[in-house]
Each structure stands twice: as C-alpha cells, then as structure tokens.
Image (cartoon, rainbow, N blue to C red):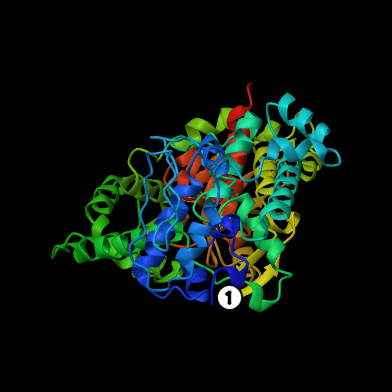
Amino acid sequence: MSAADNDIDYDVFLTLSEDDMKEVGIMSFGARRRLSMVIKAANGAATKGYSQHDSSCSDDASITSDLDQPGSSSCQTSPRTTTRMAPSPHTVPSLPMKDNMPLPSKRFSLANWLPDQPGGDDLIQSLKNCVVVSSQQRIRLVKVAVTGLTETLGLYPTASDKTSLAREMVQMFPAVKDTTPGLEGHEHFYNNGSGFLEYRLKNSRMSLPQDKKKRKRRSRQELEVAAKSAKTVVAEDEEEPITPGDQEKVDWMRYSPPTGDNQKKHRDLFIDTFSFRRKIINGSPTITDVLCQFPRLQDMPELINLEFQLLYPDQCDNFISRWGRMKEQIILAGEGNASVLVQIQKFQPDDNRDLCALTALAFALHKSVVQVRGTSTSSSRENSLLFLVQSIPEGTDVEAAAKAKKPVYQQPFLLALGPARRPVQYFAVLDKVAVPCGTSLITAIDRLFKCHFVFNVHYSPALLHFWHFIAAFIYEVLDPHTVKPIIRSFASSVRAVEL
C-alpha cells in the first residue's frame, strides 16, 4: 500500500505518528524513527523556511517515495541548508533550522482566524483590555481556538501545532499567561499532552466512532509522575532504622495523660519518636488506629502542627503568614467568575472575610465530577463546601455529631460550632473523632490541611483542586508545575490582582 493510495500529501505527512506509518506499511523501525525525526524538524522549521521550499517544489514526491519503500533505511536530512536535494527513493526534503527557535512554524493562525468569528472582535478587545481574566473569557477563547484548529487541521493536530497555538494565545493576550515561576507561560493551554486545548480536543473527539479514535498515549508528564512515584517508594524503603527505645517512649506517651508538669516531656519524646511514628502511619492504618496508638494527637492537638513542622520545617507557617493578603486577592480574582460572584455578593462587608475567600476559592476551583472508589459522581458547588466546613448549633454534643456524620464524608473536615458566619469554635472530624482546632477559622483550616499529611490521608475528591491550590501556592509543599492547568490559571489571576 503506497502513500498515494492513502492520499498522503506533504501536510498529512507532517501529522504522521509512528503508528500511522505502520498502518501505511512502513515496518522498519529505523525508517519510522528517521521519518519521525524529519517530521519533528519540519514542524519546528521557521515559516520562512517553508516559503523557500514552496517555490521549487515537488516535496511531496520525495516524501511519498520514501513512504512507498517499507524497507528504506537511509533517509537523509540537511537541517542547516536551504538548497533543495534532488528527489530520490531514499531522501526527504531538507528544511532550514534556526538555533533556539522560539516557536514552531504555524499551520494555523489564531490571529487570522479569530477576527472573522462571531463575536471575535469583542473577545479580542475584552482580553486585551483586562488585567484579570475571567473563567468565562478563558473558556470562550479556548472554544474558538480549538474550533479553528480542528476545522483547519482536523481533530488530531500535532503536538507542535498545539504548542504553537498555546504560545500564540499568550503572545496575543498577555493577561491569559500562566505566571507560575519556572514556566514559559503557555503550559496551562498545552504542554506534553495536557492543558485546556487538549481537554477541549478530547471532548470534541467523544462523538467519533471508536474505530476512528487514536490509541491513547501516556503523556510525558504522566510518565514523569510515575517515575517520581517509583523513586518515592524506593526512598521510603531506605528510611532510618527504629531504635530499641522508641516503643517504650511511645508507650509512656500513650499511658501518661498530659499535665502541666509533663507536657514538655511529651513534646520532647514526640520529636524523638518521629521516625518510628512515620513508619507506622505510612503503613496506611486508619486515623482511628493512629489516634489509638498516639492519643496525644487528640488531646494535645498542637502536636499536629509539630508533626507537620518535622515533615516540612520551612513551610509550616506559610498559610498563616500569607493568607491575610491572599484572601483579598482571591475574592477579587473570583469576581471574574459569575457563579463565584453570586456567592461573594451574599456576604456583607462586616461578614467573615476568611470564609468569603475560602468559599470563593472552592467555587472557582470546583470539581463537578469526582471519582469515588472507581465510580463517577457529580458534585454541586454548594455541596462541595460541606466537605470543608459543616455548621452545628451552639450547645450541640460535638463528639456525638462527629460519630453521626454521614458515610459520604470520609475525609477530614471541620465542624463549626455556632452561627454559620460567626462560629465560636472549630473541630476537625477525623474518622469519627473530633479534634479541637481553636476559635479562628484560619487556624482551623491550617490544622485541617496539616491533618492530611500527619495522618497520611487523601483530600476529599470534591475539594481536590481547592487543596492543591493551597498546597502548591500557599504552603508550597507541592510542585506547582504538577497541578492541573485550571489551578495554575486561577493562581495567575490571583497574582495579577493589585491591592
């Protein structure tokens, strides 16, 4: 079967994967790999380079002749010359390359496409004039961009095409740039098989018949995460050995209730037995089992903060020290989202600003579909807040309320005792145990977050994006490059707010 039989011209050739090459009969691994290198070079060439070749051209003849030779094994390229090589069964056209080329050549131009679309000029003006981009503006931009991309290049554009489009988007509209340190700025739109463009493309492909869908490949990011996980397992196997006296110290703390005289000893022994305790907790016991063996975590809840400090010495106080300024930025950034704005407007000026900001953050980063034990379930924004804080009337038996919680609330959450907007005390519900968290909402949220690490438990799926934002951009215990694009996008909007 020849390239001509499959209608493979030069443009189609530039989109071929190695699997596609197998389908048209190129069975030699070396030939496929060399062709892939040529395709990568071609997609990375400057637009000027293409124009130099177009004037002379029977490039398709040289490319398709190689596709017609399944056993060909001597493809040649001359990436630094603009002189066209004579076509032969074993050659491909040479394409000029530039060192440190910032952008791959564009086969689709958003700048040319967008003004001709309904409402395109209005979108251009709104994005060029704004400082903080709303989620509605971003969604509209992605929809229009992907529509143009697929109408021009089909539902399976190359990674180079998607990267080029993502870069063009942030060049046209600097306000949509991902300002996460260490990134170029376009990665939330597309990077290594993920991003807003890729998500939109996947949704567009859902209507395709199964036989028209390409095999799903693991992205480079997924492979890197898997590799890091493997290294983590190895590291855990190499942790410090347990000393003979650790169990005796743990037993003393377990059977010696804290008093004014021995609290310092409890703290000292708690620090001494850190490695012993982590080895037990990393074995994935339930929170109830951990509290049974280490009951001081319940009646001396400040030890939760101490444990987190031993885990992350430099990040322990980040939330308390940074929240005061960031909460106002979150509220202002959230006003760009219609559903968030509705919630913000429900708060009066003298209401709890901390609760207003946390509500705005939870609504802005709402995860509408969550996976619970392998089953997809929907979750409304209002219901997701119940996985963070639940209010009970003042005078309620807190221990009884914790034991009577609904089974759906598996992960740690807060019980707020008293009026919803002005509670008098907070408790973290861990399994069915209530642990005091003080009278301040921010102190309570700080302790609740740390409980996930201290007891080695997952975040609630409904609040996954919420907690990842806090972990990556406030505590800085999570690499911000690994979080979802929607989280980085909102973080960029927050940073853009000037108070």
Q: Is residue 248 above or below residue 27?
A: above
Q: Is residue 397 placed above or below 142 in the rendered structure?
A: below
> Would residue 239 be found to the left or right of residue 13 on screen?
left
Measured as percent of width and height from the top left, residue 41 is found at 44, 48
Mark 1: secondary structure: loop
- Residue 17 showing in the rendered view: no
Q: Amino acid at mark 1?
A: Gly
- Quadrant of the rendering where the C terminus is positioned: top right
Q: Position of residue 163 (x, y in %)?
A: 55, 46
Horizontal arrangement in the rendering, residue 189 relative to residue 473 (left or right): right
Task: Please report the residue visible at 63 percent of the width from the left and 67 percent of the height from the top.
Answer: 7
Count the marks: 1
Residue in front for this viewpoint, 258 or 376? 376
Tell me residue 245's x, y (percent): 15, 62
Figure quadrant of residue 250: bottom left
Decide if residue 388 is on the left or right side of residue 342: left
